[in-house]
Image (cartoon, rainbow, N blue to C red):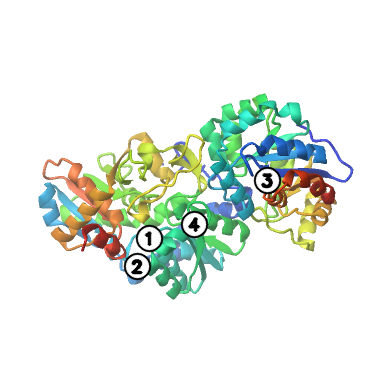
Amino acid sequence: MQLNKHANGLLSIYFTAGYPTLDSTVTIAKALEEAGADFLEIGFPYSDPVADGPTIQHSSEEALKNGMTLHVLFEQLKDLRKHVSIPVFLMGYVNPVIRFGVENFCKACKEVGVNGTIIPDLPMYEYEELYQHIFEENGISNIFLVTPQTSEERIRKIDKLSTSFIYLLSSNATTGTNLEVKDQAESYFKRIKDMDLDSPFIIGFGISDQATFRKATAYANGAIVGTAFVKLLSQEDYLKKIPEFIQKLR
Amino acid sequence: MSKYQVNNKGYYGPFGGAYIPEMLYPNVEQLEQQYLTILNDPSFKEEFEQLLKDYVGRPSPLYHAKRLSERYGAKIFLKREDLNHTGAHKINNTIGQILLAERLGKKRIIAETGAGQHGVATATVCALKGLECVVYMGEIDIARQAPNVARMKMMGAKVVPATSGSKTLKDATNEALRDWINNPVDTHYIIGSVVGPHPYPDMVARFQSIISAETKKQLLEKTGKSTPDIAMACVGGGSNAAGMFYNFVDDEDVRLIAVEAAGLGVDSGETAATTVLGKEGVLHGSRSILMQTDDGQVVEPYSISAGLDYPGIGPQHAWLFQSGRGEYVSATDDEAMQAGLLLTQLEGIIPAIESSHALAHLEKMKFKGDEVVVICLSGRGDKDLDNYMKYFNL
């Protein structure tokens, strides 16, 4: 799955399926495409999201209370491609995927037109040993994370394994931590850019406004906004506010 | 190499591994690469053994419980981990890990705790070494375990309430992992059981293996044979059982019996009997057996004993269970409480309710009369007096 290009950098939005209401998933996806998002990450909730900060934890808890499960999500996404044409990635933790069956999961992704997955607690070794062939048979791109502490050797390996993009974490942190506007982050972005990787890289974690979006896209092919958007979803009339939210990021 | 110990990829059969987000990879990799070198270093061994002797009070006695033996018709020995400093086996692991953390150059220690025993054992070694200590504890557990919270605070630890999810042990573990993600360089995470990403299950089991190493020597002195017929222990995450089984797993003549907490009964919906109800899954960084819904959401367990109140078991236990090497059984709240009272009345020892679960299984066993049974008495019952008082209207 190759991502398109955008002169000012690709804008991706993360939101949790089943939040704020069980049926809001596809409506939000559609609104985001119309507002100008370039691709989407739809989170499937898990009871123990260790890589997430309080905002996304809360959205996951609420989504589970609303009755969201992987079965419900795939049912909701049945007509996804009638409404949404931009790339869609599913993001979540590995345990629900194992319970669902990794093969069933990849097949279901393919059937509804999901392009790839981001599963932070499925490491490279386990992916290669156990699951890579299943993802590839179904044409599902699995996305790997890189942090400021990831070694160059490991980044090269991730680059080889990647079929869509590399998810570059702006800092070693849980989601919703503010990107420190410091030389440190920029020198790290520059270091990655200078590695001249085959895969495009998209920066996530701590991207919340135009300043941080521009800072990230000065180096990367795009950036991902998660927590800031999930906060918007907790407001009344959030659907009406989506176009403005996206415009202000660009 | 033993087929019941961890392999060079971090797995026990299909269980184990390191299912961690990339943010934790450098820390876990550093541990993985260095833990065996450090543990085998003579200066580490010397300091570890010295502290276990002079500070913890080891070796812990192996006590022949004669009246209990008479009652059940077997030769029953209790491995007295309850006599350790801080009152349980947990200190064996925290001593080991604090020495490791020092050698890794870490300045700050974090830990999770349920009932507070591991939190106290961690706060203790941090006081001993003058390191900063932050303990994550479920908001609900903080309210019901006030004395242990006070102990940790007296020793200078900061106790942070985990307010997410079910606000108990698994959420405290999530918070500790989040802390580690956000503080990757200066912090070491002292996990309290044989759970977590590789190398934690193996590392913690090695620190706890002193339990069975001593037991072997003591049995030889007392019975003329260094192995028992049966080794028993309770299992939550499973660290005292891992320590008790460690030096016996390869001797297939030794029966290994692990007792889980059935809570109000395995079919009651209020239970922590993981091997009965659990399915293969991933929690807190390792693949194991896990109590979960059909959608793969982790189910909150229940037991009267806070130390057994965990929805999974360590990956080595999952493998011992699945391979049939270990016998995994369970005892209810009621069975455990009665067994705790019985030990008190027959032997003058008030056991931790966790350990009472192991004792409770004796009721269901048939002996020929001369079997040697070793039970790990993992902790003392002082912390549980409230529960005993309420339960027996004392």
| Residue at (26, 60) in percent of width and height | B390
Question: Residue A123: which quarter of the image?
Answer: top right
Question: Which of A87 and B239 lies nearest the eye of the viewer?
Answer: A87
- Residue B172: assigned label: 4
Q: Earlier in the sequence, mark 4 or mark 1?
A: 1
What kind of residue is marked 3?
Answer: Leu
Q: CA distance from mark 3 to mark 4?
A: 25 Å
Residue B313 pos. (x, y %): 41, 45
Residue B46 in view: no
Query: Marks 3 and 4: CB-CB under 8 Å?
Result: no
* Label 2 CA crowd tier, 10 Å (few <14, some 14–19, many 20+): some
Residue A91 in view: yes
Query: Mark 3 against mark 4, which lies toward the viewer?
Result: 4
Residue at image mark 2? B86
Residue at image mark 3? A145
Disc 2 on helix, strand or loop? Answer: helix
- Residue B90: assigned label: 1
